[in-house]
Image (cartoon, rainbow, N blue to C red):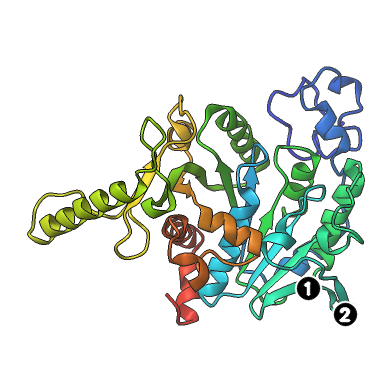
Amino acid sequence: MSGPQGQVPEGANQHCPGAEDEQAGKASACEGCPNQAACATAPKGSDPDLDAIAARLAPIKHIVLVLSGKGGVGKSTFSAQLAFALAARGLEVGLLDIDICGPSVPKMLGLEGEEIHQSGAGWSPVYVQENLGVMSIGFMLPNADDPVIWRGPRKNGLIKQFLKDVHWGDCDYLVIDSPPGTSDEHISIAQFLKAANVDGAVVVTTPQEVSIIDVRKEINFCKKTGIPVLGVVENMSGLRQPLTSFKVFSPSGTDITSAVLQAAAAAAADADADAGSGSSAEPGSRGSGSPGEVMAETAVFHVSGGGAAGMAADMQVPYLGSVPLDSALSRAGEEGRSVFDSAGSANSSSGPALQAIINKLLVATGGQQSVAANGTK
């Protein structure tokens, strides 16, 4: 008898037929296995479409998956701003939204109401600008409020069609925004992309342990499926805003905002004067606001286990950095634009943090060479 087909999942029963075998999840040896349900719904055997997917994605230099263990951590926000930032550096960028039941990318890219068009080359992405194309099921819904009530096989079929039929052309980066968790869509995307040039995955989390627990599962999923983890991003890591955006009240409820702002401005002027005279004052790198802005920062989530940085060190994967809660970033997403543009960057505390993370990603994927070739910084 021949051995198992494909990878045998960790923790599998003895005599596991292999995750890609036709009997995976159905054979008697699968009874009681923790992987049984996932294996039963995953694509089986040799898939003739895999060669077509590999050919379609061959012109793309870099493919980056954006994953999260839990919903609501800002994965799609990160995907959208990553795509905007790469395009701003002169790169040819595609953003593929495979969150079939919760497509938020059209809103975050300012493309609501757009439709997909077909040509002889395949499905054409919807373009935000000349070098940034987007594909999402959101473009296929007659009404944005219509739910997508599909079982796994139908969702997997659309994901495959996106990969096989969308014509991205010669692209520097394809960013793939995935649904949260480790469902059968994730198993399918891992199998569909086997023959493609996948650089790896960025895993997005928030600082609290209830999110970190699920991110550990996501990282283990990547390890089991052979997807390199490019790094972990901690989103919503505190609230950092210009002090002028806050109102301040005394214990009795009196508005003392004006007095506090005046005192803060005076203290900031003294600190800047000390810094200018060569004192050992703390550097102002955490300011990240407009020139002259005093920034205020506070923790939002209780961090009990070391946060994303501690988890990344424990699991031996790179930690890319943290992004604070930022009203400018929220507004950019609501308005479907880049937080780095002139309208959003003035008071953005998240912009510099995101740019630092993206710089690390470019190094990790070798994309800085493409940026240099395009003559941008």
Q: In the rendering, which numbered label is found on residue 245?
A: none
Residue located beneath label 2 in the image: 119
Label 1 CA crowd tier, 10 Å (few <14, some 14–19, many 20+)? some
Residue 345 in picture, x, y percent from top left:
46, 66
Circle 1 SS class: loop
Residue at the image position 79 percent from the left and 44 percent from the top:
185
Quadrant of the image containing the C terminus: bottom left
C-alpha distance separating marks 1 and 2:
9 Å
In terms of image quadrants, where is residue 109? Answer: bottom right
Residue 292 in picture, x, y percent from top left:
29, 63
Q: In the rendering, which numbered label is found on residue 167?
A: 1
The answer to whether residue 126 shows anywhere in this view is yes
Residue at the image position 30 percent from the left and 46 percent from the top:
260
Are the residues tagged 1 and 2 within 8 Å (C-beta)?
yes
Residue 329 drawn above or below residue 367: above
Residue 175 drawn above or below residue 171: above
Label 2 CA crowd tier, 10 Å (few <14, some 14–19, many 20+)? few
Residue 209 in picture, x, y percent from top left:
53, 27
Quadrant of the image containing the N terminus: top right
Residue at the image position 46 percent from the left and 29 percent from the top:
303
In the visual, does 12 lie left or right of 262? right
Q: Amino acid at mark 2?
A: Ser
Residue 161 in picture, x, y percent from top left:
86, 60
In the visual, does 357 lie left or right of 22? left
Q: Amino acid at mark 1?
A: His
